[in-house]
Structure formats: C-alpha cells, structure tokens
Image (cartoon, helix red, strand yellow):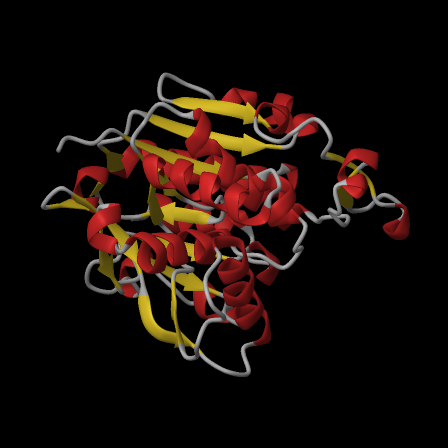
Amino acid sequence: MSFSYAIATPSYAGDYERCRLLCASIDRFVSGHGAHYLLVEDRDLALFKPLAGPKRRVIAEAELLPSWLKSWPDPLTLGRRRVWTGLGALSRGVPPLRGWHAQQLRKLTLPLKMAEDVVLFADSDMIFLRPFDLGSLEANGAIRLYRKPANIKQGMADHVAWCEGASRLLGLPAPGLPSDDYINNLVSWRRDNVAAMMALIEKTTGRDWVSAVAGQRQFSEYMIYGYYVDRVRGLDQAGHWPDALELCKVYWGGDAEGIASLRTFEDVLGPGQVAVGVQSFIGQPVEQLRALFEAQ
C-alpha cells in the first residue's frame, strides 16, 4: 500500500521561536510528507501565518474544535493563563480545560479533517538533526506505532489515570499493570483508525467524542489511540507495527547544564534517533538551540 503523510505540530505564542526553529529543521532534514500542519489558538493565527509555505499550513483552533469550546483569560491567574470553557462546555459536563488539553484535542481532531493517510506528531520544542523520510514509518504495508512494553507501573498516578480513562472511553475492562506505553515524541497515527476510534467512543459513551474525552479532564491522546489500535482492533488489523525506539532524544528538567556544554547535538543522538526535544520549561535559550542546530 502507498501511504500519504503529514506532520502536525500544536503550538502557541510562547513557543513561536522554537516552532520556527522546528520548521527550519523540517525544511532541511525531513522528506516524504505532503503537508505540515501548525495547530494554533485563534488569537495566535496572525503570529504564525508567516511560517506558512508550499507544504506548511497554519490552522486556527476554530477549524478544529467545536464552537462551544473556546479559550478565555483565566481570572484565577489575572489573565496570565488561558482556560478553555463556556456555557456549552459546562452544560455538556466538560470542566474548564488548560492549554495542554486543547492541544491534545486539536491533535485528535486533525486526522478527521486532513486528506493524508498518516500523521506524524512533532512538538514545537523539537529539532530535526538527521535526514528523516516519513516513508520509513511504513513496513510491509503497516505504519510504525511507538509502544514501550510494560513501561507504565503502579505509582505513576497520572499515567495510570490515563490508562483507566482510555479503557473507559473504549469500553475496555480496567487495565492491568504494568501497561504498555504509547506516549512519546514523533508518534504516528493512521487517519482511518482515528475515525473508527471516534465512532466507537461515541457508541460506548453515548456522547459526542469531544465531550466524552474532555469530560474526563485527565486524558492522554496517545494512550487512547494506543489502546484502541492495540487492544480493540489489534495491531495487525489496525495496520501498525510496534517499535520501542525513541526517535527523539528528549531533555527534561535539570538537563539545561548538559545542553550548555554541548559542541554539537550529534554528541547525544543515539542510533536511529533523528531529533532532539528540549522542553521549553527548562529555560534553555532558543538562541543556543539555534546555534547548535546551525552547527549540525
């Protein structure tokens, strides 16, 4: 089977410079995709528009989320943060949501709107550093699915809640632990599976899928999709093959000093890794990241 591919990046104003660097790295190193979608809040559309190009489209949230779910300045933070809510959301049992919830909902919606068969999610705090062709995701007519066996264990409170929530949405029994983990950078989904998954969620819950997912507040888009294709359909039927390789080397909190000492990102990339992710909250200056990218 011949697949068509897209890349998708949810972002926001605070990550604009990092997202611009990601776009430059995709243009330099990545091939095999027909489109790169930037998924942003409505108020950030004008800021991100200059990043659009022949293969890159900036999509405002209004094109993806229902009209009853909109962002507002959060009065509890004196407007420093945003909250996604509204009378329509509250009447549907959807509690006020944060930006990371909205980003997940954008990612869940995009495959229902796009024309490409496969989407690869690349966060805006990532940088591609080695050549990568999206066609490499396919093997024997199936698409790569990140799956790390038995990685979620008792005591990982958030992850356990995400496993339980995914099971409820899909009508599965309570998950046993340890559970396989589907959360990572550079995760690929098939559009046809997302459409079938949403139909199942609506049948199981009796609600529209946005209300059903967001109504839980604690949810992981990657766990929901992973549980669906692995535990409901089965990977063979869903057209996926499992891979535990982390394509992206990620720096989390406390790693800033390690980055500052690097001469090149090549020093830290492992076999098969094609990108580095530097979480924005660790405070690494984007200028240094750009210098390391340009030295690659």
Q: Find the residue positioned furthest to the left.
A: 140
- The picture quadrant where one finds residue 193 is top left
Q: Position of residue 142 (x, y in %)?
A: 18, 45
Figure check: 242 above or below 62: below
Q: Is residue 84 left or right of residue 124?
A: right
Q: Position of residue 90 (x, y in %)?
A: 80, 42
Quadrant in which the N terminus appears: top left
Residue displayed at 76% across by 43% down: 82
Q: Is residue 183 left or right of residue 234?
A: right
Q: Is residue 253 visible?
A: no
Q: Is residue 174 visible?
A: yes
Residue displayed at 33% across by 46% down: 188
Figure check: 39 above or below 90: above
Q: Position of residue 23 (x, y in %)?
A: 41, 34
Q: Position of residue 100 (x, y in %)?
A: 62, 50
Q: Find the residue positioned furthest to the top.
A: 54
Count of number-bearing discs: 0
Figure check: 196 above or below 112: below
Residue displayed at 13% across by 42% down: 141
Q: Is residue 277 left or right of residue 78?
A: left
- The picture quadrant where one finds residue 294 is top left
Q: Is residue 17 left or right of residue 21?
A: right
Camera-side residue of 230 and 245:
230
Q: Find the residue positioned furthest to the bottom.
A: 155
Residue displayed at 34% across by 60% down: 231
Figure check: 200 above or below 23: below
Camera-side residue of 91 and 276:
91
